[in-house]
Amino acid sequence: MKQILLAAPRGFCAGVAYAIEVVDLALKIHGAPIYVRHAIVHNEWVVRSFEERGVVFVEDISDIPNGSVVVYSAHGVSPLVRQESRERNLTIIDATCPLVTKVHNEAKHFAKKDFFMIYIGHEGHVEAEGTMGEAPDRMVLVETPEDAERLEIPHYERLAVLTQTTLSVDEVRATMDVLKRRFPHLQTPPKEDICYATTNRQAAIRQMAPRCNLVLVVGSTTSSNSNRLREVAETLGAEAHLIISPEQIKPEWRTDYPVVGITSGASTPETLVEDIIGRLLEGQSNVPVEVVEAVREDVTFKPSRDLINLAMSQ
């Protein structure tokens, strides 16, 4: 190995940092145990560190004792989940990423105006389930351009499209092109739904990958945006792997690949990236590490003033 390239931006996006801060504040206010509906973010390291502090992660609201504290994960929840929470008299703290909330609000807006919606997303992903839950009888999911080509729906005078926030920019563009050709009156939101962090991290990969023999994406297999980063690198001709720990590094990666590029998904702590770099550099000297910066990020989301004040008063 002669060089390591480090993509920027990488790692935590503003929505992930926001969700983690909300859980921290909830612990300060209420103490353990508190319950989180679904993994707060799709990274097992983050989940495990919260579990060690008394956070209990559940998939079903019915698994939470009546009257407990529940935090909604960054991916958002459907109105049905909110209703179930109220029925169990839960104290609700919402850590939904504001950019996911934006898509929920668009779904409500279009449903109120009697639109039928096509949602571009991944079947079974918790963000897709939450958003589609806003109008389950007025929304259909497509995953790929091929799905869009095969889609059969009755004619609707009012038709709109929404998108999961963590998808591949290129794949969404291809799917959107098919939908616009097939349904010329399709209405899109004023601003695209794919989040700035997903777009920026994919832009950094596009800039870095052509210079690499191997690209390592540090992130969880359950993370949609991490998987998309690996796919983008592969489309640019680089061998790419998604890994979460130094133990997954193969010996030949340190010897047979002159230029190794590294990035990380939006829910990956920087400490995991540092661990990977440390393992790659073991026993090697004078291997330069170059940062490849595509764009400078300065977006932040702050928890509500009420939540912060409550935590400070404890």
Image (spheres, rainbow, N blue to C red):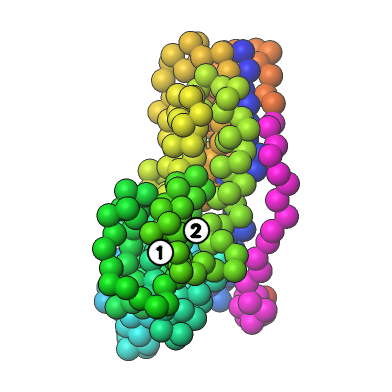
Quarter of the figure that contains the N terminus: top right
Q: From the image, tell me which residue sits under label 2.
A: 165
Instruction: Identify residue for label 1.
Output: 183
**Residue 155 location, x and y as percent?**
32, 73
Q: For the residue carrying disc 2, how many other residues have a C-alpha within 10 Å: few (<14), some (14-19), or many (20+)?
A: many
Earlier sequence position, callout 1 versus callout 2: 2
In depth, the one of 60 and 48 nearer the eye is 60
Q: Amino acid at mark 2?
A: Thr
Q: For marks 1 and 2, give the CA distance.
A: 22 Å
Compared to residue 228, the image places residue 280 above or below, namely above
- Residue type at the position of mark 1: Phe
Residue depicted at 58% across the width and 49% down the height: 199
Residue that appears at 33% across and 62% down: 141
Q: Is residue 162 visible?
A: yes
Q: Total number of numbered labels?
A: 2
Q: Nearer the viewer, residue 278 or 146?
A: 146
The residues colored magenta run 291-311
**Secondary structure type for disc 2:** loop
